[in-house]
Amino acid sequence: MSLLVKGIKRRGKSIGFVPTMGCLHEGHLSLIRRARKENDVVIVSIFVNPIQFGPREDYKRYPRNLTGDIKLVKSSGGNIIFNPTVKSMYPKSFSTSVRVRGLTELLCGISRPGHFEGVTTVCTKLFNIVRPDVAYFGQKDYQQAAIIKRMAEDLNMGFKIKVLPIVREPSGLAMSSRNKYLFNKKRKEASIIYRTLKEAKRLIKSGEKNTARVKECIKDSLLKNPYIKIDYIAVVDPQTLMEQKRIASTVVIAIAVWMGGVRLIDNILVSV
Ligand code: AMP
């Protein structure tokens, strides 16, 4: 890959980069299409990164579909797929870690300790290999994008980061490779998450400034479904991700729930 990248750079071409864990869906493809529009060459990485999964998480059973992914990357305008092996990314001697403080200790960082350190470490490696001009991320993983932006700025990585909107299934459920774990009925019922986010947005828009009351409404709505277990409901500042007691400016409402053993996240930006 390094030689390939060197050649692209030598020819003065720009590189758009879309890092993924594969099992691609329209959410990923929206990033690839945008990268296609804005760059000469689009590189897509497909790598299920073991170090971002906790010991009791789904690394082994995470859905994989390389053959299907290759077709989708091609048809959406990606030029190069980078699909490294775990051994090549993490040889026995590997001993470095990249950790962003603060932002990683909130929201998903609480129930998934070490997760974001795995993400920032792998992204740093990928960025160094691919040397992008622009890297594309999805708002679906709002906290992840905020952390990567922080890291890129802190470490003078020198490329642009773009965060693109959440692509949803017709039901409103945010697309995710993990939706494959949800069988028909639960998949339909999981649309309650986005409905609830929209209700909360309406509530804020209609003048509710009290975060506790907004969160209470979200909780009541979600718990109507007996299969949902709430991990967190948070109303946070879009940059610092700190909880806001009162809603005085734009906030992100972020939700993480468990549904039938599957962890689902979603969020919505609300400007006031
Ligand atoms: P993943 O393969 O889940 O690691 O995701 C790779 C990239 O695709 C990340 O930047 C995600 O935020 C983004 N992504 C995943 N799902 C969606 C979605 N539904 N809409 C937009 N971007 C997404």
Image (tube, grey):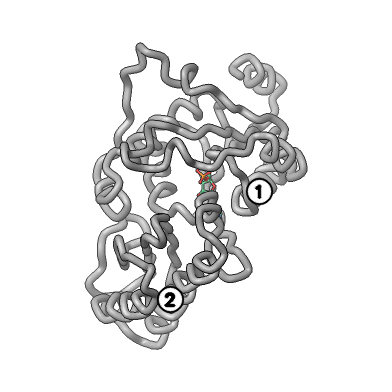
Residue at (44% x, 48% y) in the render: 145
Q: Position of residue 105 (x, y in %)?
A: 25, 47
Residue at (45% x, 52% y) in the render: 141
Which numbered circle lies on residue 191?
A: none
The quadrant in which the C terminus is found is: bottom left
Q: Is residue 163 visible?
A: no
- Residue 148 is left or right of residue 183, and the answer is left
Residue at (63% x, 50% y) in the render: 25
- Above or below residue 237? Residue 200 is below
- Classify mark 2 as within 8 Å of ligand 1 or not, answering yes or no: no
Residue indicated by mark 1: 29
User: Element at badge 2?
Assistant: helix
- Residue 214 is left or right of residue 195, and the answer is left
Check disc 1 and give the amino acid type: Leu
Residue at (53% x, 39% y) in the render: 21
Along the line of sight, which residue is nearer the eye, 36 or 115?
A: 115
User: Element at badge 1?
Assistant: helix
- Above or below residue 167? Residue 70 is above
Check disc 2 and give the amino acid type: Thr
**Quarter of the image holding residue 210?**
bottom left
- Above or below residue 51? Residue 229 is below
Q: Position of residue 80 (x, y in %)?
A: 68, 29
**Quarter of the image holding residue 150?**
top left
Q: Position of residue 73 (x, y in %)?
A: 70, 40
The quadrant in which the N terminus is found is: top right
Residue indicated by mark 2: 196
Q: Is residue 9 visible?
A: yes
